[in-house]
Image: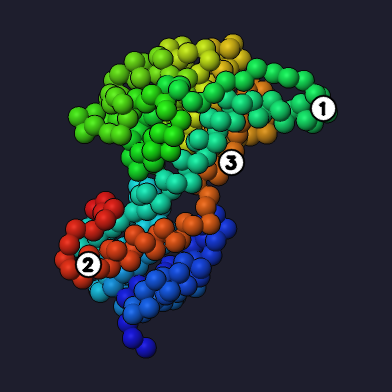
Amino acid sequence: MADPDVVVLRQKIHGIEGSDYAEILRERLPDREIALARTPAEEREYLSRARVATGPTADGEDLAAAENLELFACVYAGTGHLPREAFEEHGIAVTNASGVHGPNIAEYVVGAMIGHARGFHRAQRQKRRREWRSYPTTEVYGSRVAVVGLGAIGETIVDRLSAFDVETVGVRYTPEKGGPTDEVVGFDRIHEAVADAEYVVLACPLSDATEGLIDGDVLRTMRSDAVLVNIARGRVVDTDALVAALRNNRIRGAALDVTDPEPLPEDHPLWGVSDVTITPHNAGHTPAYFDRLADVLAGNLDRLDAGEELRNRVF
């Protein structure tokens, strides 16, 4: 048997099997040998022979025997869980899945904004009561939106919002890089960014700078008719402060795909707040996940052959 060009390690993402990923890669790369590892033993065997591996993680001991491995294509956007020292020690490049979630999460954000503007959550409550009663609504069109985090997901959100003629302000670590928003500021100016925004969208990674970023003080700065949309990480928001702000009408509502704690306990007070929509860390779900991963990996195989810089390389 020929050494595989790519080994697909064991994984399930959003209920989709790794075997589906392997099949997509075989269709995309008919001239490459694609192997699917189904057991730990097969993973060790293929890693010792493959040039490229793709999956959620790899064991440091397995990497020590991966003499031919040049690239590990992580199937997650975040790579903090990987044994970085082991990859660097063995000279294995690592890429991530940055950009794969952009279209689907951007749709979630736009949908959440429209849902809160048009009062869909209220309509659902009234439907359960069989209550025919008109209620006031707002528009996303022409509003001001603060997008915290201008990575691949944040930029895609801004792109999708362009159809609504909104005014945007972006918040990022390095504001001097600019961005697709009308204005870009640093995290030290978070209060300025959210003060006039009808929607505050969190799309930033969790870090020392962002943990607890949206605290009671920032929530007091936000408009009383503002909606917070969090597709970042739960700990970017001070949950107790958010509950207090919602209960006291300091902000209008929130759409939360992530929470702190997570999963959200059944008795948590957030469940009982009427103007909050909660989804179980589901914004990233898309049937196109492995197709988009395959696009990144196929391009990087060509770059690897040509000795060019890899797309989405993290270390």
Q: Is residue 117 left or right of residue 29?
A: right
Q: Is residue 107 left or right of residue 213?
A: right
Question: Which kind of residue does numbered mark 3 sit on?
Answer: Pro
Residue for point 78% across, 30% down: 127
Q: Nearer the viewer, residue 160 or 259?
A: 160
State yes or no: discs 1 and 2 in contact (Cβ < 8 Å): no
Secondary element under disc 2, as helix, strand or loop, is: helix
Disc 1 packing (10 Å; few <14; some 14–19; many ≥20):
few
In the rendered view, how is the structure colored?
A: rainbow
Which of the two discs, 1 and 2, labels the residue nearer the N terminus?
Answer: 1
Q: Residue reaching furthest bottom?
A: 1
In the picture, the disc for residue 129 is 1
Q: Nearer the viewer, residue 4 or 284?
A: 284
Viewer-nearest of labels 3 and 1? 1
Which of the two discs, 3 and 1, labels the residue nearer the N terminus?
Answer: 1
Viewer-nearest of labels 2 and 3? 2
Which of the two discs, 2 and 3, labels the residue nearer the N terminus?
Answer: 3
Q: Which residue is mark 2?
A: 304
The quadrant of the rendering that contains the N terminus is bottom left
